Every structure is written in structure tokens, then in C-alpha cells.
Amino acid sequence: MDLEGALNPPKMKSSRNIGRTDRRLRFIFSFLLLIVGLWLFNGASADPTGLTISIFSGVIMLTAMSAYCPLCHLFRIHTLSAEELDIYGFPYYSKKNMVEA
């Protein structure tokens, strides 16, 4: 077994496209949006506006927890820092890598 290969595994395509700072901001924003939806718009009383806002905040919270946003993936945007790119790898394949694979 090659010890060098075991210590330095090859970079894989990451399923993450949201960085640490973006995740924190999304989580805080979604929590505040949940409070607005449940209390200010009476989402807890089954008001459609409040429920819609609460569900939208849940989607934002899921993207923050999973570190993956389908909308960012669609537009090939990532908010990973250079340090996170070193750890997790680049989230998208380039055309060159797809042709070689």
C-alpha cells in the first residue's frame, strides 16, 4: 500500500457549495424569519401568510444545515473560502475535468 496516497488522498468533488460564514448568516436569518412568520403573521394559528414565511425559513435553514444550495448549484456559485476549498475540494467539475473523466 502506498503510504503517500493514504496520507494525501486525491481531491474529490465536494457536495458543499455554501461556506462557513454564509451558513451562519443563513441560519440566523432563517431563525429570525421563523419568528416573524410564527408570531408576527400568526403562522402558529394557521394563517397562510405566516405559514408560507415559516416554510420558506425552514428551507433556508435546511440549506444552512446541509451546506448545499440547489439555486447556487444551478448558477455555479459557491461561497467557500480558500481554506474550505483546500479541505472539501472544488464543488463543480470544469469542462476540462468532465472530458478527461
Image (cartoon, rainbow, N blue to C red):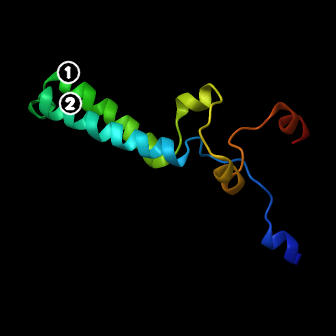
Q: Amino acid at mark 2?
A: Gly
- Where does the image place residue 94, in percent across and percent down from the top left? 80, 34
Report the Cα–Cα distance between label 2 and label 1. 8 Å
In this rendering, which labeled residue sits more in front, label 2 or label 1?
2
Name the residue at the left extreme: 45
The quadrant of the image that shows the C terminus is: top right
Left or right: 23 in relation to 42: right
Residue 46 lies in what quarter of the image?
top left
Lower position in the chain sequence, tag 2 or tag 1 = 2
- Where does the image place residue 45, in percent across and percent down from the top left? 8, 31
Q: Amino acid at mark 1?
A: Thr
Residue at left offset 85%, top offset 69%: 5
- Where does the image place residue 98, in percent across and percent down from the top left? 83, 36
Q: Secondary structure at mark 1?
A: helix
Left or right: 75 in relation to 33: right
Q: Is residue 81 above or below residue 59?
A: below
Left or right: 101 in relation to 36: right
Residue 57 lies in what quarter of the image?
top left
Q: Is residue 50 above or below residue 15?
A: above
For label 2, the crowd category at 10 Å Cα-Cα, with few meaning under 14, some 14 to 19 and many 20 or more, is many
Residue at left offset 20%, top offset 30%: 37
Q: Secondary structure at mark 2?
A: helix
Q: Is residue 27 above or below residue 3?
A: above
Residue at left offset 57%, top offset 30%: 72
Q: How many marks?
A: 2
The quadrant of the image that shows the N terminus is: bottom right
CB within 8 Å, label 2 to label 1: yes
Q: Which residue is mark 1?
A: 49
For label 1, the crowd category at 10 Å Cα-Cα, with few meaning under 14, some 14 to 19 and many 20 or more, is few
Q: Which residue is mark 2?
A: 37
